[in-house]
Image (cartoon, rainbow, N blue to C red):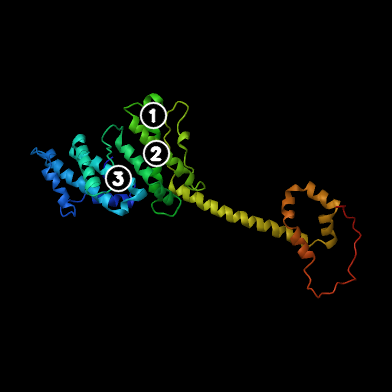
Amino acid sequence: MEIGELKSKCSFLKDIWSVYDMFIQNVYGSEYNEILISCDRGLLFQNPNMNEYKNMCKQLSRNMLLLASNSNYGGSNFSKYCDILYIWMYYEIKKKMLSNSTIEKIFQNSDKMITTKLHKTSCSYFSFNEKLQEPENLIKLRIFEHNTSTFQNILNNISNPNNCSCLKYVYDCINTYNNMNNRFCATDDHENITYKDTCGILKNFKTSYSKFFRNVNGVIYELPLLSDTTNAAHTPTVIDAPSCLSIRQKVELNFSGDDQSSGSKQISISTALSTMVGIPPFLALIYKFTSVGTWFRTTNRKVTDVFKNVDEEIEKKIYPPRHENATINSAQERYNVAYEQI
């Protein structure tokens, strides 16, 4: 996967790609020119055919200085932006067919200059070009690992225009993890020197995904657990991302279902009230207080729940509230009703 395709797949991660674009800018006119000229004088580049390495030295040193001296890239996000530096290094080395060992020496020299002379914190050395299986797939997983909060915020907002591409990227990562973990890290024997670093990145992805899984809205998405994606023979199962249309329809159905449920409760109560209002007061009292009412409620359990919620409403309909100064009518009708003992 080339860098252009990767940027297209997760174009919604604008902050990291703005840093990447800054890394590929020309070094001429840089504020660090006085430092960068050391790349022209270094003994490492005395060979006349080393111009490509001199240019790489200047770019790499400049980019490391940008991260070290800018507070916007520090704190908890420092490792995320260092990873963008490593991704840039990977594609530069691949495109220009540079020596990993020479690039490591350039990196170490720049790191020493930043930490000892400028007293800044520098990115530690790391290379996707060494000791890793399928580095471009691992780059994809590392991008997810360092940006889980962004993925979470986008997915939890169903109306976000990046929702679809974000969901597809997550499922792509899930399938990549399952496939690579099965081939390189499924048994203890796999985690030897050859696959150790690869399995380390896969483990970190699993940890990040587990936290991400718990924080994504489960009503909207039914994301798979990584442990659910292999069968008994440890063969990875490819999982397709659900269509955005089906997810939006599900959300709309849930909302309309809530509205209908609320409306049906109102209808049930209203129907019960309108039915009971037409019953003479003595029958309502029989229903509420006597053994006849108890028997009726017991043998008609389907309607019991409705009536349990409307007892007070019935009383209000039968006995409207009186004003404090109202006179009790002593001529009220009397009914001979046998009450249950309470």
- Tell me whether circle 2 and circle 3 mark residues in contact (CB < 8 Å): no
Residue 113 in the image, given as x and y percentages of width and height:
21, 45
For the point 33% across and 32% down, the residue is 197
Numbered badge on residue 82: 3
Tag 2 near tag 1, CB within 8 Å: no
Please name whichever residue, 145 or 268, is drawn nearer the observer in this view of the structure: 145
- Crowd class of label 1 (few under 14; some 14 to 19; many from 20; radius 10 Å): many
Where is residue 260 drawn, in percent x and y? Answer: 60, 55
Q: Position of residue 286 (x, y in %)?
A: 84, 56
Q: Mark 2 falls on what kind of element?
A: helix
The amino acid pointed to by label 1 is: Cys
Q: Nearer the viewer, residue 218 or 200?
A: 200
Q: Give the left or right position of residue 134, taking residue 256 as reference.
A: left
Question: On the picture, is 87 further left or further right than 260?
Answer: left
Q: Quadrant of residue 112?
A: top left
**Side of 180 where 211 appears, left or right:** right
Q: Using the rendered image of the protein, determine whether residue 240 is visible from the camera's viewpoint.
A: no
Q: Residues within 10 Å of mark 2 (few under 14, many from 20)?
A: many
Per the model, the C-alpha gap separating discs 3 and 1 is 26 Å
Q: Residue at x 32, y 27 (%)?
A: 193
**Residue carrying label 1:** 185
Task: Give the quadrant of the N terminus.
Answer: top left
Give the vertical position of 245 relative to 198 (above or below): below
Rendered view: 94 above or below 246: above
